[in-house]
Each structure stands twice: as structure tokens, then as C-alpha cells.
Image (cartoon, rainbow, N blue to C red):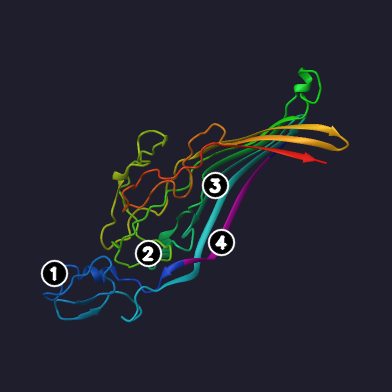
């Protein structure tokens, strides 16, 4: 039997992230957002209006609100190596081999933080550190064990080809879920980082009231919401939102994969191996994955559990060794 405990810490720098190089100026847009702030009969500034022409009440013309490039340029997102990330974890491991039983059990208590978990998540162009949050793949608690037990039927029954060669093996995983990603694919921030068709998302996030989330511990119930959506609202115009991109976890996973095997020796180094496998053997409903919960406040299913792992799958196999 071997037991081990370790601390793992990593830090990465100069990661590639997507950042807007020609963002809108929220303060300028807000100063042109009311009818009395612009010339009579001219447009006021608002969401998605970074590229429009405005005339102030004093007669000054603004060719859009973006900068620092001139008015001939619109959105100009760049892949820049300014990202930072970190991972810290406690890792415990137990390994045992004795007679008919072999098993390995591992537990990790960890957290991963970054500014962007994929190239589609833009960072705040004025202060990229404001985009730092839980990684989309961060898992707080992760327990996995794999085992094989050679069933001792021959010790209780007459030893023969039918009672020898049986084994039970499997992998069990019990984990917390992935963080819920909160987004608002509008442009209330007036910065103009709304999706441009390259699978990216806006930097806008909802406003968070700070109240309890009332996480639904049993998504299999008739309650559709995983968290209390009344704790969130559209971000105030001119602000990127007060909620972090990710700060709480989605539904966890309890999964048992099991296999029953039987070896029949045929002599002369020949044998038959039969195996029956069941994935998610107890058919437990698992709602896992980075997109298991809809965090888009503009969606009709905001806060709902919308993704599930496969139900029980069974298969059988026969192998002839010679």
C-alpha cells in the first residue's frame, strides 16, 4: 500500500488572448446618449453605436466613439500574448495491491484561474486583469478510483473452467461540476466587443446583486433553474457588469463504469476472454460540461440546466488469444 500527498502549483504567462484594440469610449457615448446632448434631429449614442456619426449639441462632430484609431476603422480585435493563468491543488493518492485486489484512488482539491479559457473569450481592453476568473475547466473536488478484483469463486466452489478466471473491474468518478460561464452578448458596456462571428463572446457580464444563489442540488427535480436568476440583471449601460465571468460551479458528477470479465483457458497458450461492460451502470443522470448550465442572460433558458451526459451504455466483447 502506497499513500502520497502533494501540493501542485503552476503559473503561466504570455498566454494568447483576444483583446479589442479599437474599443468604444463609454464615457463619450454616454455624453451623447440623451436628445438634449446632440444636435436636433441627429442620432443619440447607445449599445452597438460605436461606429455611428454623432453631432453634439454644441455642433461638434464625432465619427464614432472608438479609439485610438481613426474613424476609418471599426472593431479591431487582436490575438495578444498578455494572458496569465495559475493552478493550485492538493493531490492525494492511494495505491493498493494485495492478493486478488488492485486499486488506485486519487483525490484533487484544486482551482484554476485565468483571464481567458479559450481564444473566443475576449478580455477587458482597458484593464485585462478585470477578466480574471475561474477557468472554464476548473474542477474544485475530483475523486477517481480504478480497481480490479479477481473473484474467488474457485475457493467456494469446485475449481474448474467455470469457476476460475472471473474478475470485476471498474472506474468510479465523483466530482464537482465545471464553473457556470456568465455572459451578456449585447453591448451595454458601450465598448463594442460584441461577437463578430469568430466564435467569440462579449466582455459584457450581468450585474450581480450579491444575494444567495440557491443552487439546485438536484437538477433531476422539476425545478428548471440551477441558480436563482433574480440575483442577476442586465449590466447597467456604460459598465461591463459586476459579476465575474465565472465564480460558482455547475452540477457535479457521480459515475460508475464497471466490467465483468471471464477467462477460459483452452490449453496450448490459447484462451477465450469474455467481457461485459456498463458505462454509467446505475444510469445516474449527470449534468456535466462547461455548457451544462445556460449562463447567457439574454437567453430564454438563462439559469437552466441544458446539457446532460449520456445515459447507461452497455457492450459485450469476446477475445481469442493464441
Say which element carries label 2.
loop
Asked whether the beta carbons under mark 3 and mark 1 sit within 8 Å of each other, the answer is: no
**Separation of marks 4 and 2 at Cα, in angstroms:** 27 Å
Judged by depth in the image, the label closer to the viewer, 1 or 2, is: 2
Asked if the residues shown at circle 1 and circle 2 are in contact, with their CB atoms under 8 angstroms apart, the answer is no
- Which of the pair 200/126 is nearer the observer? 200
Residue ID at (37%, 55%): 183
Q: Which residue is mark 3?
A: 110
Closer to the N terminus: mark 4 or mark 2? Answer: 4
Segment tinted magenta in the rendering: 4-17
Separation (CA) of disc 1 from disc 2:
28 Å
- Which residue in the protein does label 4 denote? 12
From the viewer's perspective, tell me whether residue 251 is left or right of residue 147: left
Magenta segment, principal secondary structure? strand
Count residues near mark 3 (Cα–Cα under 10 Å), then give few for <14, some for 14-19, many for 20+.
some
The percent coordinates of residue 74 (x first, y second) are: 34, 75
Task: Please state the horizontal and vertical placement of residue 280, each as a whole percent of the image.
Answer: 56, 36
Amino acid at each position: 500500500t502506497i499513500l502520497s500527498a502533494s501540493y501542485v502549483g503552476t503559473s503561466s504567462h504570455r498566454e494568447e488572448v483576444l483583446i479589442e484594440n479599437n474599443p468604444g469610449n463609454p464615457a463619450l457615448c454616454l455624453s451623447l446618449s440623451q436628445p438634449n446632448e446632440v444636435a436636433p434631429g441627429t442620432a443619440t449614442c447607445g449599445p452597438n453605436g460605436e461606429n455611428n456619426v454623432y453631432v453634439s449639441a454644441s455642433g461638434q462632430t464625432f465619427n464614432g466613439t472608438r479609439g485610438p484609431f481613426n474613424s476609418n476603422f471599426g472593431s479591431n480585435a487582436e490575438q495578444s500574448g498578455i494572458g496569465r493563468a495559475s493552478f493550485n491543488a492538493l493531490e492525494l493518492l492511494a495505491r493498493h495491491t494485495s492478493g486478488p485486489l488492485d486499486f488506485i484512488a486519487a483525490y484533487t482539491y484544486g482551482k484554476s484561474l485565468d483571464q481567458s479559457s479559450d481564444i473566443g473569450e475576449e478580455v477587458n481592453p482597458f484593464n485585462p486583469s478585470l477578466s480574471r476568473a475561474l477557468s472554464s475547466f476548473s474542477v474544485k473536488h475530483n475523486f477517481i478510483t480504478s480497481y480490479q478484483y479477481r473473484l474467488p469463486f474457485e475457493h467456494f466452489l469446485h475449481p474448474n473452467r467455470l469457476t476460475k478466471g472471473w474478475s470485476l473491474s471498474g472506474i468510479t468518478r465523483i466530482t464537482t461540476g465545471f464553473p457556470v460561464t456568465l455572459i451578456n452578448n449585447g453591448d451595454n458596456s458601450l465598448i463594442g466587443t460584441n461577437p463578430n462571428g469568430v466564435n467569440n463572446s462579449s466582455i459584457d457580464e450581468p450585474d450581480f446583486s450579491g444575494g444567495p444563489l440557491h443552487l439546485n442540488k438536484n437538477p433531476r427535480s422539476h425545478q428548471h433553474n440551477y441558480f436563482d436568476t433574480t440575483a442577476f440583471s442586465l449590466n447597467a449601460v456604460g459598465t461591463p457588469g459586476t459579476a465575474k465571468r465565472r465564480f460558482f460551479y455547475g452540477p457535479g458528477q457521480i459515475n460508475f463504469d464497471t466490467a465483468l470479465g471471464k477467462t477460459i483457458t483452452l490449453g496450448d497458450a490459447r484462451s477465450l476472454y469474455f467481457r461485459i461492460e456498463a458505462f454509467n451502470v446505475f444510469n445516474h443522470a449527470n449534468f456535466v460540461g462547461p455548457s451544462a448550465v445556460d449562463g447567457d442572460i439574454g437567453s430564454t433558458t438563462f439559469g437552466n440546466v441544458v446539457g446532460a451526459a449520456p445515459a447507461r451504455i452497455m457492450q459485450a466483447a469476446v477475445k481469442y488469444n493464441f
